[in-house]
Image (cartoon, rainbow, N blue to C red):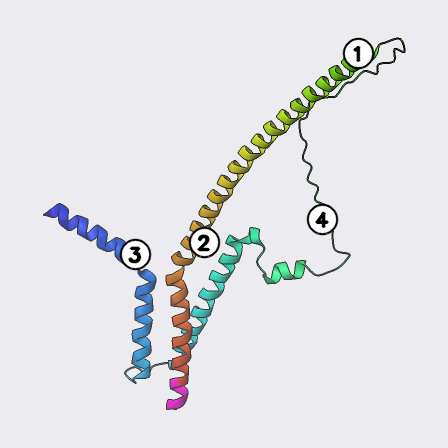
Amino acid sequence: MKNRVINYLQRLSKWVLRGKYHLVTIIVWLITVCYLTGVVTLWPTFIASIFSICGLTILLVQLLLDARSFSDYKPNTIKNWIREFPLSKPAVANHEHNIKLPLSAKVHYQIFNSDNASLGEKVKHLLNQIGIIKSKIEAINNDIEKTNDKLSIVSEELTRKVNKVSDVLKTLIAGHAVGSYDINLLGIVLTIDGTLIQIFKVQAF
């Protein structure tokens, strides 16, 4: 029984800690309702200003944290915008991609210059040279096939790596966006409630 109580208290504390920003948001809502209904009338201008300043500060801090977290993607922050001021000619990127094929086959041929050779010998020599050229062509084709196989393997490996990086990036972005939802909501609620209290105070007086 004691262990069950301790386990429940641990889970309850984790739940409360996880929802700390939601609890603050609920408290802000309750305070706002009290001001809007006239239950509380103490320092409405001060409370409204505090709410609005805190809300805007939270949103600004979250915005700066987002820009820092994704700085590699160069978000359009004020700092990056100033750095991109065109002071000189734009730099032209020179990208060169060279693909080298390991073709090791070389074609060798011999010139038959004997004037005393018979027609049969010349034909035989010609056929011999044709056979050599065919063998070299086959060697070149084999090298090309090997190169294509290597390129296919490299392409598949790169595709797997890109997909893996894409999945990791999506997970990070989703975790960041969902993870900061509660504090962003708190900032928005503080700003809106501060404005509402200020409007209520102006209308009332």
- The Cα atoms of the two marked residues, 3 and 1, are separated by 99 Å
Q: Residue at x 17, y 49 (%)?
A: 6
Task: Estimate the x, y position of residue 17 in percent, counting from the top left.
Answer: 30, 56
Check disc 1 and give the amino acid type. Answer: Gly
The local crowd at label 1, few if under 14, some if 14 to 19, many if 20 or more residues have their Cα within 10 Å, is: few
What is the secondary structure assignment of the residue under circle 4?
loop
Please report whichever mark, 3 or 1, sits nearer to the chain's N-terminal start.
Answer: 3
Q: Is residue 87 left or right of residue 142?
A: right
- In the rendered image, residue 201 lying in the magenta stretch gets the answer yes
Q: Quadrant of the C terminus?
A: bottom left
Q: Which mark is residue 120?
A: 1
Comes first in the chain, label 2 or label 1: 1
Q: What x and y, as percent, mark residue 178?
A: 39, 58
Secondary structure state at the residue bearing disc 1: helix
Q: Which residues are magenta?
A: 200-205
Which residue is disc 2 drawn over? 173
Image-quadrant location for residue 131: top right
Q: Could you tell me which residue is drawn at 74 percent across and 55 percent down?
A: 90
Real-space Cα separation, disc 2 to disc 1, in angstroms: 78 Å
Camera-near label (3 vs 1) is 1
The Cα atoms of the two marked residues, 4 and 3, are separated by 50 Å
Q: Is residue 161 left or right of residue 96?
A: left
Which residue matches tag 4? 93
The foreground one among 52 and 177 is: 177
**Looking at the magenta stretch, what is its main secondary structure?**
helix
Q: Earlier in the sequence, mark 1 or mark 4?
A: 4
- Residue type indicated by callout 2: Ile
Residue drawn at point x = 34 percent, y = 62 percent: 21
- Tell me the number on the disc at residue 17: 3
Give 128 or 68, whichever is nearer the viewer.
128
